[in-house]
Amino acid sequence: MLVEGIDYIVNANGLLVFTREYHLKRGYCCKNGCLNCPWDYAKHSKESAYKQNEKK
């Protein structure tokens, strides 16, 4: 069972946002660019997109 404040928060827009702790408990990256991704997937995907654009 998910616990508010530990596994998720509800942001100002009323959306459920999973926490870093939730992601770590799940144990893998879903590669959706989650806000609290402990594996920094969104950061890495932006960097690779930047490098690809640099080559063109």
Image (tube, rainbow, N blue to C red):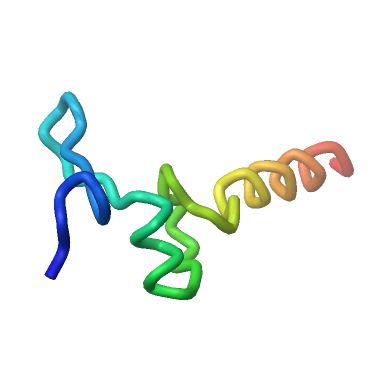
Give the answer, above or below, for where 3 lies relative to 5.
Answer: below
Along the viewing direction, whichever of 53 and 39 lies nearer the viewer: 39
Along the viewing direction, whichever of 9 and 52 lies nearer the viewer: 9
At 26% from the left edge and 51% from the top edge, which residue is drawn? 6
Q: Is residue 1 left or right of residue 54?
A: left
* Quadrant of the rendering where the C terminus is positioned: top right
At 15% from the left edge and 49% from the top edge, which residue is drawn? 4
Q: Is residue 19 left or right of residue 17?
A: right
Residue 8 percent location from the top left of the image: 23, 50
Residue that sits furthest to the right in the current view: 55
Residue 26 percent location from the top left of the image: 38, 73
Residue 52 percent location from the top left of the image: 79, 47
Q: Quadrant of residue 24?
A: bottom left
Q: How many marks?
A: 0
Along the viewing direction, whichever of 29 and 6 lies nearer the viewer: 6
At 15% from the left edge and 57% from the top edge, which residue is drawn? 3
At 39% from the left edge and 57% from the top edge, which residue is drawn? 21
Along the viewing direction, whichever of 31 and 18 lies nearer the viewer: 18
Residue that sits furthest to the top in the current view: 12
* Quadrant of the rendering where the N terminus is positioned: bottom left
Give the answer, above or below, for where 46 lies relative to 39.
Answer: above
Q: Is residue 14 left or right of residue 41?
A: left
